[in-house]
Amino acid sequence: MDSHLMFRRRLKTRQRQAGLFKVLFMAATTVGILTLAVLIIDVLKDGLGWLDWQFITSYPSRKPEDAGLLSAFFGSLWIMFLTGLFSFPVGVGAAIYLEEYAPDNRLKRIIQTNINNLAGVPSIVYGLLGLALFVQALALGRSLLAGAFTLTLMSLPVIIIATQEAIRSVPAAHRLGAFALGATRWQVVRHIVLPSALPGILTGTILAMSRAIGEAAPMIAISALVYLTFIPGNVMDRFTVLPIQIFNWVSRPQEDFWHLAAAGIIVLLIVLLGMNAIAIFLRNRYQRRHEE
Amino acid sequence: MTNLASLEVKNLELWYGKFQALRNISFAIPRNQITAIIGPSGCGKSSLLRCFNRMNDLIPGAKVKGEVLFDGSNIYLANIDPSEIRYRIGMVFQKPNPFPKSIFDNVAFGPRVNGLGINLEDTVERALRRAALWDEVKDRLRKGALELSGGQQQRLCIARVLAVEPEVILMDEPCSALDPVATLRIEDLMRDLAKEYTIVIVTHNMQQAARVSDMAAFLMMEEDRAGILVEYSSTSEIFTNPRDKRTEDYITGRFG
């Protein structure tokens, strides 16, 4: 009877503790969501009035009312397209090699550790690497190609790691079942592993792409901070990107340019959300088709 | 014909790294019969089964010594492609493992990867009929295989193996994840399939071995945990008149 009473009293304390932690965790979530909401509202308030067709279709200008982000918008689209084109096959290929082919030895562990570390290297370092390697040593100049290669290097570790995780989550039973029917390793990868892993691979790739097109630092390092009044027509052209255009406007003293920066941020956010929407759409579509 | 050996094991030894899993196993598996491999958990029954279609090749560190003769030639010779062995010797796993694809694509998988993609519709129908699953799934061949019940999934896995028309079917405790009704259906199917195929089944279920098999091999662990073949003879011999004391102890339930 006595111990029952003690249990009751303790239970009350334990439940109070549980309630307390629930509130703490909720508060932690709220901090993030509130900050994001304030940010979005602030940006919309500042920039929405300046976001119009003229802003999208004009080149940068000294006069805020004439200025637009046409060149930066297309620069970002180019960079995104090229970076995806290079980093997706190389990243997925490397991940397939590491997971499906590479023998489990010291060399593989060294490579693995390096990839994990590279994923945490600050983007400005990739920018300096890009400047030394692609712009100067390979003499690509300050071109779209040099920029895309730089961002490819930056995205690769993220794509490789995401793809490896996705490949690892494919049940061994499916793999063995396919081998037992006489499939070769490539057939197992092609028909069993990749279809199951694809949603995870796409998610990882889009995440890496989103990060890449939001980056200003490495692009500044390879000097894409320019006043550009043409749309890049081929991969050797000079270019600029949205984050840099935004950065440029923010650093102006006139207040009107800050509104332009806010409008630019809205465009960048829409591009990012659009990419994520495409990723979710592809993932759902593929998942459903795969399971049918 | 029935007296000819389909598979013959000679002085087979299996290591996983430094651990010896099987020691000096020799016996012959007759054609068109069901041979059961029985024994306590961990004695190497499944490891032995995986030696017959070279699935142990996929385990890093696994090493096989000795010979496994299939139609008289050693499947471990350097010039033998394991894919060919697995194409001729099919395998059904412990847990039903249909691919996350449609019922049709599951059965068609083997013919497709082996380049036998002509008349797929006929091949799939024949395999499903042979696995006693056709009537249950004929109206939903394009639906996902994961929607089937456990027993249906296992018969689908059998159909998947039958579709490549192997000569031998290996079954690794094929009923251990199934309920008794589904188990009996699979056992009936096995008896039926044994008319055309050589079947080797690993089971820890003594009644199942007694019910379905013609021959039985009793495996046991030695002190270093390596599996050895204690006794091999007809199932009726093993169960009614075992020669070895250890076999008798095991089947009468004194250990294991």
Image: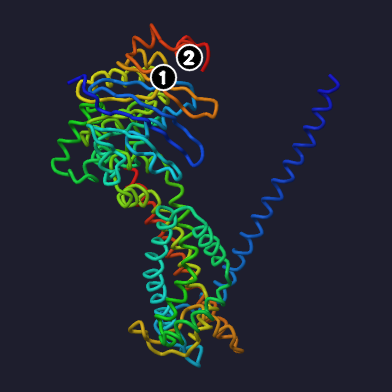
**Which residue lies most toward the top here?**
B240
The residue to which callout 2 is attached is B246
The reply to whether the C-beta atoms of the residues labelled 1 and 2 are less than 8 Å apart is yes
Name the residue located 77 percent from the left edge and 32 percent from the top edge: A11
**Counting other residues with Cα less than 10 Å from the Cα at mark 1, is it few (<14), some (14-19), or many (20 or more)?**
many
The chain ID associated with circle 2 is B
Residue B131: quadrant of the picture = top left
The residue to which callout 1 is attached is B218
Q: Position of residue B41 (x, y in %)?
A: 49, 24
**Residue B160 in the figure: left or right of residue A288:** left
Name the residue located 46 percent from the left edge and 80 percent from the top edge: A241
The chain ID associated with circle 1 is B
- Element on which disc 2 rests: helix
- What is the C-alpha distance between the residues marked 1 and 2? 9 Å
Q: Position of residue B216 (x, y in %)?
A: 35, 18
Is the residue A208 above or below the residue A3 in the image?
Answer: below
- Element on which disc 1 rests: strand
Residues beneath discs 1 and 2 located on the same chain: yes
Q: Position of residue A107 (x, y in %)?
A: 50, 60
Is the residue A17 above or below the residue A163 in the image?
Answer: above
